[in-house]
Amino acid sequence: MFKKMRRIMGLTLASAVLVTGCSTKQAVETTTPKAESNKQTESANKSESPIVITYACTNRDQKDPYYKDPVTGEYYMKENERQVYIQILEEIKEELNVDLQFVAIPGLIWEVLLQSVLAGDPLADLVDLEINSQGRILAQNVIQPLDDYLDLLGDNPSPKIYGKHFFLESAASGMAWTLSPLVYNIDYIEAVEALKVNGETVYPTDLFNDGNWTWSVFTDYLATIDAHYANSQAPERPEYRIDAFRTDYTETLIEAIHANGGALYGDEGLQIDTPEVKQAVAYVEELINKGLLKANIIEGTSNTPWASQATNFNLGETVFTEIEDWRLGEAASKAADRGQSIGFIPFPRPDHMAADDPNYQPSVTKGSSTIIPKGISEEKIPIAIATYNLFTEKVTKAKAELKAALGEDDTKTLKGTDIFHEKIGADTAEIYNNWCAPVNEYSIMVGVYWNFMEIAGDSLWGANGSPRFDVAWESNKNKITDKLSTIEALLNTEEIKDNISPQVDKTAEGVFSIPVGTNPSTLTWTDKFSATDNLDGPLDITTATFDTSLTDFNTVGMYKDGIVVTINDASENTGKAKANIFVYDPANKEAPVLTLKEEYRSISLDEDTSKINWNDFVESAVDADGLNVLSTITADLSTLDPTTKGDYTIGLTVTDFANNSTSTELVLSVK
């Protein structure tokens, strides 16, 4: 394979002009016939100055041996590791006549990549796309399809997305991301007497190894745990009980779908409208209806606060949960502080599926991906591919040699799980090491994962008047199918699509406080907001709409999202901003009430006092009508010396919207 790459590069570079600097727009002219021999090619390569290939990567500190910590100015890599990477770059220069240079990604990748391609100056020859960004960037049509270079991508290229090959990493390499695994508190399970047989706990690993880890068994297992902890108090927040299974239900959905042999968008394309998906949704619905699956649902929606279940698990408030593997280190540390440890188990399979069915799999998506942006010359594309392949090959080999030198094997372990547990440690390690699959879920990459979760979530929790999933899917699936069709059609054109909404910002200081009885038509909002677009620059805010229909200006109160600002850019992308409105009584003459917290934090030595959030010290601040006026608190810090330890008495003042004030003193400790 390498010889083939070398030959292709030689044909391209035999008469390449001198390339200097990091620009990706410098031309490479080809005048040497493509039939020139390898011997002539290699000779020409060595006589030419190296061609620069630039690589914009998400984890530059882990790839670029010349990257320095912006704070310390020191090289980020450890010196021994740095020398390995320097050697790799030298070998690439020797073998390919390429000077591989790493460049920064100066902002959000979907913004800077789009801007650079439209400007005719792509960000780099090779660009990493972070997880969750691929769908948005595919919909911009800024990625160079690689179908014409398929023979350079190896024997196992990444599968087609929208009918084309876009990603450089092979199907078996690159960063694969097993979506949040199912984990549990081992000690909580051991405390449940009803889970014991002859005095010995039946662990999930036992059920898995015996081939009995099915949906119905998991349901019964959760019910037994739930009954045991029905009247419990969590260890750190006793106002909470210990739940059997508190999680982010979207993680449960995707795991149940793949445990049932399904996918949202797999190797065969969109697969939502299949029995495997519908059965999995029905099972999750069953767990919810039985009260065995709990989730932190935001009122009136089917949304959950991001990773809130991790907080519950860390604080010992649930037996089972699903969280990202990189969070398990913190969870294990918190559990260890309580003398507890964590186990892992694959999500159970449906009852009709055999334990050894190859379709019983975890859900695995791509993490970051590497692409070549549009605008890179045809001559340079195969060089960039060859450079990426050789760099990846050499880094992989170097890591393997390092592991071998350290006496490490290839056994996979899930960080944070107790693989040394006397009863189940070995089983946990073996099950996890064998519980693997190639990438089998592309819905995040094509940008339909959250569209599905919105439809399924609304049906499961009855949000927004949604019917059950089978009905909801039939009436809403066009949202997904139309989206896929639109993007696929775009990808078969040369059009570059701006799909980034403009940014609307509140420019006025403080909150919006309006006297009761004000006629909303007399209010001016254009001087209180501004809008900018990633391509169009500053937008004319007078073209925005200002909607205050949620505010009753004749009734005192706080109106959440009382003002909604909407504006479009030249590509008809819509940007929005929302702000609360406080309608107050200007005739109020009563001073507001300021209540300090009974306990509050100290401040650190040399802490920046301008950044202190006084809500850390104040329990409440309300006016005579009960309006929250915390935002108006000011502090007199004239007696405070944050550079010297000690106790200082400072003054706090709150002023309501009618200009009535209350002051109090606070003893602040500097430690």
Image (cartoon, rainbow, N blue to C red):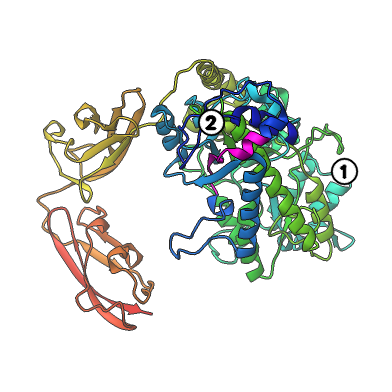
Residue in the foreground of this view, choosing between 233 and 150: 150
Q: Is residue 61 left or right of residue 83?
A: left
Q: Residue at x 58, y 61 (%)?
A: 315
Q: Is residue 425 left or right of residue 446?
A: right
- Could you say where residue 282 lies in the image, as x and y percent from the top left? 67, 31
- Which quadrant, please, contains the C terminus? bottom left
Q: Quadrant of residue 450?
A: top right
Classify 130 as above or below 612.
above
Disc on res. 211? 1
Q: Residue at x 25, y 56 (%)?
A: 631
Instruction: Decide whether residue 45 is among the magenta residues.
Output: yes
- Which quadrant, please, contains the N terminus? top right
SS assignment at label 1: loop
Q: Which residues are magenta?
A: 43-59
- Could you say where residue 628 lies in the image, as x and y percent from the top left? 26, 54
The answer for how far apart the CA atoms under marks 2 and 1 are is 38 Å
> Badges 2 and 1: C-beta atoms under 8 Å apart?
no
User: Is residue 314 at all visible to an observer of this figure?
Assistant: yes
- Could you say where residue 401 lies in the image, as x and y percent from the top left? 76, 55
Disc on res. 135? 2
Q: Nearer the viewer, mark 2 or mark 1?
A: 2
User: Is residue 440 at all visible to an observer of this figure?
Assistant: no
Q: Quadrant of residue 290?
A: top right
Q: Amino acid at mark 2?
A: Gly
Q: Amino acid at mark 1?
A: Gly
Label 2 packing within 10 angstroms: few (<14), some (14-19), many (20+): many
Classify 348 as above or below 616.
above
Residue in the foreground of this view, choosing between 669 and 223: 669
Q: Of label 2 and label 1, which has the lower sequence position? A: 2
- Could you say where residue 203 lies in the image, as x and y percent from the top left? 81, 55
Label 1 packing within 10 angstroms: few (<14), some (14-19), many (20+): few
